[in-house]
Image (cartoon, helix red, strand yellow):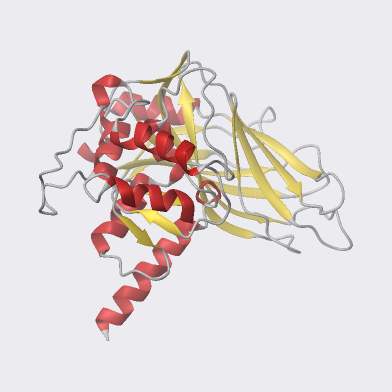
Amino acid sequence: MNGVKKSTSAKIKLRGLLNQSDNRTCADCGAPDPKWASANIGVFLCLKCCGVHRSLGTHISKVLSVALDEWSDEEIDAMIEVGGNSSANSIYEAYIPEGYTKPGPNASNDERRKFIKSKYELQEFLKPSLRITSGKDSSSSSTQSNISGKILDTILSNSTQKEGMVEFIGLLKVKVVKGTNLAVRDMMTSDPYVVLTLGKQTVQSTVISSNLNPVWNEELMLSVPSNYGPVKLQVYDHDTFSADDIMGEAEIDIQPLITSATSYGNPEMFGNMQIGKWLQSHDNALMEDSIVNIIDGKVKQDVSLKLQNVECGELYLELEWLPLDQ
């Protein structure tokens, strides 16, 4: 009985990860609704890309069906640690040459194979010092390349990553928790979703239909450049036959979070404690002071926002800082 519960719980975790916005398209070609995953790399894949991954061998990519195969707890935990397609691609595609075009959903098998081999087996788009070596002669699972763990180590242990001419100092994980009393944009209701923008990056939550008090509990990831500014948050009402309507906006000042985290260093060295604060004022959208805490070795911040330039609506977020220089 416990084994059944454990298996069911693991499947729920995996489904939850698959439902993240960046995981709803194939990591390699962008095809919608991927049903496969590379358990050791930590990415979700479409059927066509899955076939190429299988051809590389399990020492490079261990492919499993999200719905049909049995997953170990270790494999699911590794997928969760990586965080999904965006996190993995921020490493594996960090140095794609200017002018290089990734294969699309309708790419030929040859185009797909060339890109996937370059990306994972040859690691041509990784920063050279971060390239992971693995031996084809390794047969035991303990000596296989656990690339998902390597990616996480890269995110948390190296001082900088560069993409083009932009230098990144860390990752910002934003958990969009819920909205309350959102504005009506349709007949008596709205179909809200959240868009976050930092620099040239934009990530989007799922659309929740016909709900003015939506609960997302959805994690989105942004890379933070060294010259970062505030995160721009916008809420929209999804419309099928016309342009989506704005339902409010706000700016999130991430400096208190990053400054506090940087001053304390490795949060795993400390117990649970408050380390900083973003103060509510007339100049920001905060409903109350936003406290930066170390919780279970992680730097987190709960943020409650009164949406701006709209008649009503509040949004609740949880931020987490993942530095590159821990």
Answer with left or right where residue 132 lies relative to residue 43.
left
Q: Residue 32 at x, y = what percent?
A: 58, 52
User: Quarter-wise, where is residue 91 in the image?
Assistant: top left
User: Quarter-wise, where is residue 149 in the image?
Assistant: top left
Q: Residue furthest right?
A: 187
Answer with left or right where residue 180 lies relative to residue 16.
right
270 vs 44, nearest the viewer: 44
Q: Residue 267 at x, y = what percent?
A: 27, 37
Q: Residue 230 at x, y = what percent?
A: 58, 26
- The structure residue drawn at horizontal position 81% and vertical position 54%, both measured from the top left corner, is 240
Q: Residue furthest top?
A: 165
- The structure residue drawn at horizontal position 45% and vertical position 31%, both measured from the top left corner, is 257
Query: Vertical placement of 186 versus 303: above or below?
Result: below
The answer to whether residue 46 of the structure is visible from this angle is: no
Please state the total of marks drawn on the protein image: 0
- The structure residue drawn at horizontal position 50% and vertical position 56%, both measured from the top left corner, is 34
312 vs 191, nearest the viewer: 191
297 vs 198, nearest the viewer: 198
Query: Vertical placement of 198 versus 16: above or below?
Result: above
The answer to whether residue 94 of the structure is visible from this angle is: yes
Q: Looking at the rendering, in which quadrant would you find the N terminus?
A: bottom left
- The structure residue drawn at horizontal position 67% and vertical position 55%, both measured from the top left corner, is 207
Q: Residue furthest bottom?
A: 1
Q: Residue 64 at x, y = what percent?
A: 35, 60
Answer with left or right where residue 178 lies relative to residue 213.
left
Q: Looking at the rendering, in which quadrant would you find the C terminus?
A: top left
